[in-house]
Image (cartoon, rainbow, N blue to C red):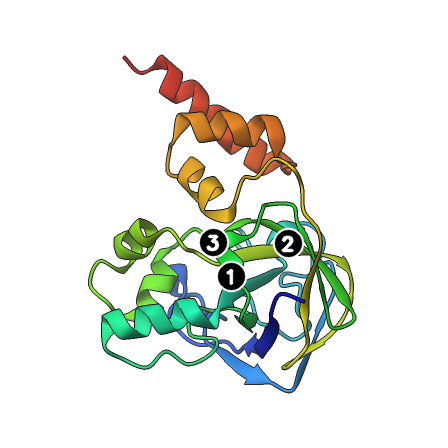
Amino acid sequence: MSGRVQSVNIGLPVPGGPKGLPSGIAKLPAPVIEVRAPGPKLGGLGSGVVGDFLGDRRHHGGDQQAVYAVAREELDWWAGHLGRELPDGMFGENLTTSGHDVDASIVGEVWNVGTAVLKVTGPRVPCVTFASRMREKGWVKRFAKRGRTGAYLAVIEGGEIRSGDAVTVSYVPDHALTVPDVFRAWQGDTELIRRVLALVELDDADRTFFTRRLRAAERSP
């Protein structure tokens, strides 16, 4: 056991999404959540958490972004720097962990949590909805500079997760690419893009994104 779930959180529709759409980023603690594989980003069930509202299904949700996890310790770090309380669920996470360094996770590692089995798929990329939620000047750049984004997870086996459940890592790939490594690849680090393309299991959309980013970098003088 490497940690536990401090809080499980579900989003309700609130104003603040892109183009005037409601957003589900405002997550509130719940007694229990049920997770399942939601299917494709477009045409699927949206969030991997049953009852979790998702407003922008073009950019969020689907199997690769089914569940979002953030360490309580990371929320506490930001709370200290921002001078304000950040409750569980503030970053829009479904799982707030304690004693588990989410950002040290290797992309592709497998977690057993409650009766569910989850797989780390990559970083959260900050967006305007997140900035609107936080109401902090320059939030997207500040969050990106910190580079500890929390992790998206796919649902390998559905089940129920409660506060207090252990987070047990049952499989770790040998490529050693962490969630922050893949985030730096998203930001344009060409060497990390090459490693991600060679070593990480990607869906078609992410592989296309990284391939195009690498080609553009290689064409630059």
Helix, strand or loop for disc 1? loop
Q: Closer to the observer: label 3 or label 2?
A: 3
Q: Quadrant of residue 47?
A: bottom right
Q: Is residue 61 visible?
A: no
The residue wearing badge 1 is: 101
Question: For the residue marked with disc 2, what is the amino acid?
Answer: Gly
How far is disc 3 from disc 2 in space, using C-alphas?
14 Å
How far is disc 1 from disc 3 in space, using C-alphas?
15 Å
Q: Earlier in the sequence, mark 2 or mark 1?
A: 2
Q: Earlier in the sequence, mark 3 or mark 2?
A: 2
Helix, strand or loop for disc 3? loop
Q: Is residue 176 above or below residue 91?
A: above
Q: Is residue 162 above or below residue 120?
A: below
Q: Position of residue 140 (x, y in %)?
A: 30, 55
Q: How many residues crowd mark 3 within 10 Å: few (<14), some (14–19), many (20+)?
A: many
How far is disc 2 from disc 1 in space, using C-alphas?
24 Å
Q: Is residue 143 above or below residue 107?
A: below
Q: Closer to the observer: label 1 or label 3?
A: 1
Helix, strand or loop for disc 2? loop
Q: Quadrant of residue 215?
A: top left
Residue at screen point 63% across, 61% down: 46
- Quadrant in the picture for the N terminus: bottom right
Q: Position of residue 78 (x, y in %)?
A: 32, 69
Question: For the residue marked with disc 1, what is the amino acid?
Answer: Asp
Q: Position of residue 143 (x, y in %)?
A: 32, 56
Q: Position of residue 58 (x, y in %)?
A: 53, 51
Q: Is residue 58 left or right of residue 203?
A: left
Q: Is residue 168 left or right of residue 217?
A: right
